[in-house]
Image: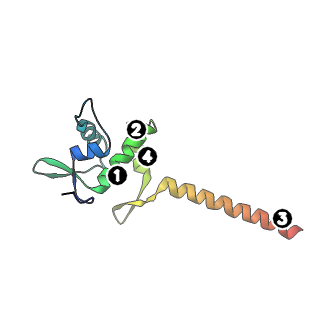
Amino acid sequence: MKKNSKAYKTIGEVAEILELESSGDKKNTHTIRYWESEFKQIKPTIINKRRHYDVRSINLLKKIKFLLRDKGMTISGVKKHLNEDFFDIDGKENQSINALDLKFKLNKINKLIKDLKISNGKKNTR
């Protein structure tokens, strides 16, 4: 029987999802525990003394792994990025509004507006 994709995942399952493999078949769960101690945003649900992660936590762990391993950021750099990254709306973390993406999109819109004004100005002078 396949587990529901929205169901909580154990730390071992999350290590598999993140492809955190140690030598052999052993799962690298200690990395997740370390990240959990460093990043206050990761809050697994504890059931019978075992960690269980929801989709939000797994996505956050994926982002942390990407920033640390692929982008080469430091722990403090990732902390700063995560603190700036989300707007707090009604006391809830809103992952749909990414501050960096929003800033990029606003800059792009401003540039388009300036380009339109310039091109309209050229048309009016002819």
Q: Mark 2 belongs to which amino acid?
A: Leu
| Sequence order check, earlier mark of 1 and 4 | 1
Total marks shown come to 4
Q: Is residue 113 left or right of residue 29?
A: right
| Sequence order check, earlier mark of 2 and 3 | 2
Dot 2: within a 10 Å radius of its alpha carbon, few (fewer than 14), some, or many (20 or more) residues?
some
Q: Split into 4 quadrants, where in the image is the N terminus? A: bottom left
| Sequence order check, earlier mark of 2 and 4 | 2
Judged from this view, the residue extending furthest toward the bottom is: 124
Q: Is residue 70 left or right of residue 30?
A: right
| Sequence order check, earlier mark of 4 and 3 | 4
Mark closer to the observer (3, 1): 1
Mark closer to the observer (2, 4): 2
Q: Position of residue 98 (x, y in %)?
A: 46, 56
Residue occupied by mark 2: 68
Element under label 1? helix
Element under label 3? helix
Q: Position of residue 47 (x, y in %)?
A: 13, 52
User: Which of these two is toward me, 49 or 15?
Assistant: 15
Residue occupied by mark 1: 59
